[in-house]
Amino acid sequence: MARILCTWELGGNYGHFAQLLPVARFLAESHEVLFALPRDFDAGPWLAGTSIGTLEAPSRSRPIAGTPRPVCYADILRGYGFDDPGRLEKLLAPRETLLCQVRPDAVLVNSAPIASLAARRLGIPRFVIGYGFEIPPATSPMPAFAPAAASAVLRDESLVVRAVNSLLPRSRAIECAFELARGDQTFLATCPELDHYGPRVGEPYAGPLYDADSGRALEWPIGEPGVLIYLRHDTHGLDALFEAIADEAVPALAHIPGADDALRVRASRAGVALSNAPIRMRDALGRARLMVCQGGHGTVSAALLAGVPLLLFPQHVEQLLTARNVVKRLRAGAAVGPADTAAEIAGKLSACLRDPGLLFAAARFRDTHAAGNGGFSAHTIADSIWAVI
């Protein structure tokens, strides 16, 4: 029996944990599996009934204040100090301490470049799961998120590579920055249409990976299909969305992490049923007419694989790229921008509820990827890991 440590570092809410969890459940059938979790993350509802253990992860890293908007993945790493050997060493030290205490036979990571680098330095096998954004193509220069000079991207990459290699044994040094996003085995848990960098040639896709079966099972407020909402409490346009839902008189279920009493009152007045706990996606999407979310890959994948169109409220570059794929490539939804007015938000909600083309596009995605139900992808990835540990 092997001991496998699972963790993620960058990103909040449930998305990264939910991508690791289905694979961890399969691995726990034959191995000892542990999650290193942030102190404030309550995994109890998801891990109940499993043999998976937990321990406290080192404090989350925060981007350096004043860091400019990233133009490529290397820029994101620089924002956390990957171009500064002194700062990077301080990030690595507590993670190496944890690894030496736990002594895992392997680590399974998602969006955890610091923990992955610590494992590389210690010679611990690394399995990396990602949905595209945090696993850039194996090229140098790596693709930019927006038009940018290749020379600028190469400069960013060279700064990162130089700093990282100054802290690694020569035998474990890297040649290109993209190696920091990859492991001994790397699983691209998405599909070509949702890949943030566009379809890749010669690199296999494991298929979308998400947890659709955890959470609270809720009944829709009334019998007809409605709107399922997963948004942050500080989302721009949230009140405008509530007002538009009230005007449409469409039933709505919502989970809004961080919602206070005042927000709950506003939701109730709009006829939105608010859940304190995450909602079981598989049940809710089976009766949903529309999914409203920030643009997290797992939630978007679950909706599209259920044939449900999306209204997206992206907040950062990763979600913006996902929204671009949904709106422009798949034509299966609409996106709300930071400057959109209440009237514009209401118009987009109305269009998403009434445009048959969006429903057709979402159904086409569902039918194209009929086997990609999250659990299938998790089992495939777990089988690959079982084969080598």
Image (spheres, rainbow, N blue to C red):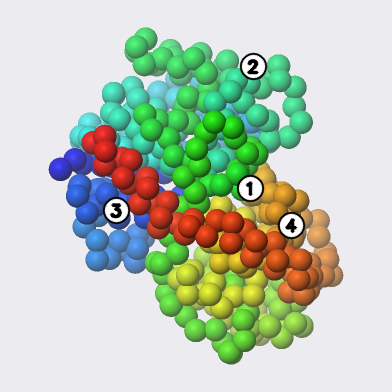
List x then y, in percent, for residue 271: 64, 85
Quarter of image, res 248: bottom right
Q: CA distance from mark 4 to mark 2?
A: 36 Å
**Mark 4 or mark 2, which has the lower sequence index?**
2
Residue pictured at 55% horizontal, 56% vertical: 369
Residue nearest the viewer, comparing 214 with 256: 214
Question: Between 253 and 286, which is closer to the camera in this rendering?
Answer: 286
In the rendered view, would you say 104 is above or below 212?
above
Q: Secondary structure at mark 1?
A: helix
N-term mark: 1 or 4: 1
Residue wearing tag 3? 26
Residue 342 vertical placement versus 85 (above, below): below
Locate residue 173: give its quadrant. top left
CB within 8 Å, label 1 to label 4 = no
First in residue order: circle 3 vs circle 2: 3
**Does any portion of residue 37 appear in the rendered image?**
no
Q: Given the image, on which type of amino acid does mark 3 rest? A: Phe
Residue 155's label in the rendered image is 2
Q: How far apart are the alpha carbons under marks 2 and 1? A: 30 Å
Q: Secondary structure at mark 3?
A: helix
Instruction: Provide the residue designation for mark 4.
Output: 331
Report crowding for label 1: few under 14, some 14 to 19, many 20 or more residues within 10 A (C-alpha). some
Question: With 360 as the anchor, is 203 left or right in this view?
Answer: left
Nearest to viewer (mark 3 / mark 2): 3
Work out whether mark 3 precedes mark 4 in sequence or the reverse, and give the earlier one: 3
Circle on res. 193: 1
